[in-house]
Image: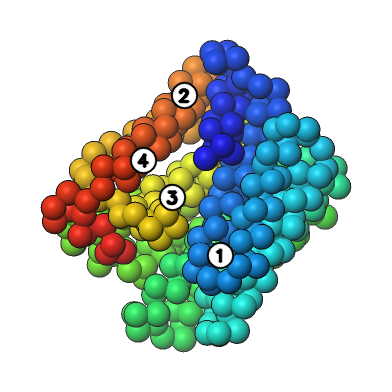
Amino acid sequence: MLSLLAGLWGALGRLGFTFPPPGPHAIVFHGPLMVSGFLGTLVALERAVGLGRPWAFAAPLAAGVGAVSLLLAPGTAGLAAFALGGLLLALILFAAWRLQPSFAGLALVVGALAWCAGSLLLACGLPVSRVVPWWIAFLGATIAGERLELARFLVLGPRRRAAFAAALLALLAGAALALPSPATGVRLLGAGALGLAAWLSAFDMARRGIRRPGLTRFTSTCLLSGYVWLGLAGLLALAFGAPSAGPRYDALLHSFFLGFVMAMIFGHAPIIFPAIVARPIPFRRIFYVHLALLHLTLALRITGDLAGLPEAVRYGGLGNVVAVLVFLFVTVGSLVSGPSGARGMRAARPA
């Protein structure tokens, strides 16, 4: 939560808002704090809880220490801690894969190694724009792998599995190729993202969950809407190549990290957080407010990027921050208030 709030604070500073006065470290390390400090810690903590072995909690601990280190004393130590967190997460996922081998489990391992690689490259002095493909590979492989895990309940023929594997390999190969050839690598990465978006939209269990009431429908709505943003990020990568700054860069990054990844967080939070803190989160219709606010303000921001409207980008970005803060307020409030009748019982039904 500290990483997320610091990252949002830095986002406001990058957008030109000076109240509250943004800390320079939060502005400079906005990306690493959001991706490694918040998302990396969250993914590692979820997997450590799932594995249930004491050593596994060293992974979220390392990522959390890295975030605090960047805020207090910026340097390579914090980035190295992120790399250690990624390596330990890969070991957790490998241990789980050995217990139950599957292609989905292997995708998760490779995704964690992409996080480790990106953190090491950042620690070695590469700019954030050159590391972003590795972050996309990390989160893309992680989310797609988790959805494929759930798809084991569906009948997927060899062609469908081959299509998933091809899209995932394109995503990972694009991240690696982006080092020597940024434009070519990012376009290959975009093709992989577009392929994953198409596959998930067609075969994910969310297509069935959208017909069920309560939390299941909300989670499915988050997932399916997130896949639209994933597809847009893929199209932007194919069209623009590897912009290192400016509106095109902003549109590409936030289509993926806000539209896709944050929609996944919104949808899975009522399922993941209870598993971590051992308290249920009852579903409430107000959950749709922060989801709608995220999509509407992000659409304004991306439109501003592509149409050359800086004020639309600025206030769309402000709306993005507000949407995440509303999400935190509503989720924590629902967690503290506890179950409320039958709604609380539906909180444990994943899409």
Residue lying at 78% horizontally and 33% vertically, measured from the top left = 73
Q: Residue furthest right?
A: 124
Which of pointers 4 and 3 lies earlier in the amino acid sequence? Answer: 3
Which of pointers 1 and 2 lies earlier in the amino acid sequence? Answer: 1
Q: Gap between marks 4 and 2, in whole Å?
A: 21 Å
Mark carried by residue 265: 3
Residue 170 in picture, x, y percent from top left? 62, 66
Mark carried by residue 332: 4
Q: Secondary structure at mark 4?
A: helix
Q: Secondary structure at mark 3?
A: helix
**In which quarter of the view is residue 205 placed?**
bottom left
**In which quarter of the view is residue 207 placed?**
bottom left
Residue lying at 62% horizontally and 23% vertically, measured from the top left = 14
Answer whether labels 4 and 2 touch (C-beta < 8 Å).
no
Q: Gap between marks 1 and 2, in whole Å?
A: 34 Å
Which of pointers 2 and 3 lies earlier in the amino acid sequence? Answer: 3
Residue 45, above or below 298: below
Residue 19, above or below 57: above
**One can see residue 127 in this view:** yes
Q: Secondary structure at mark 2?
A: helix
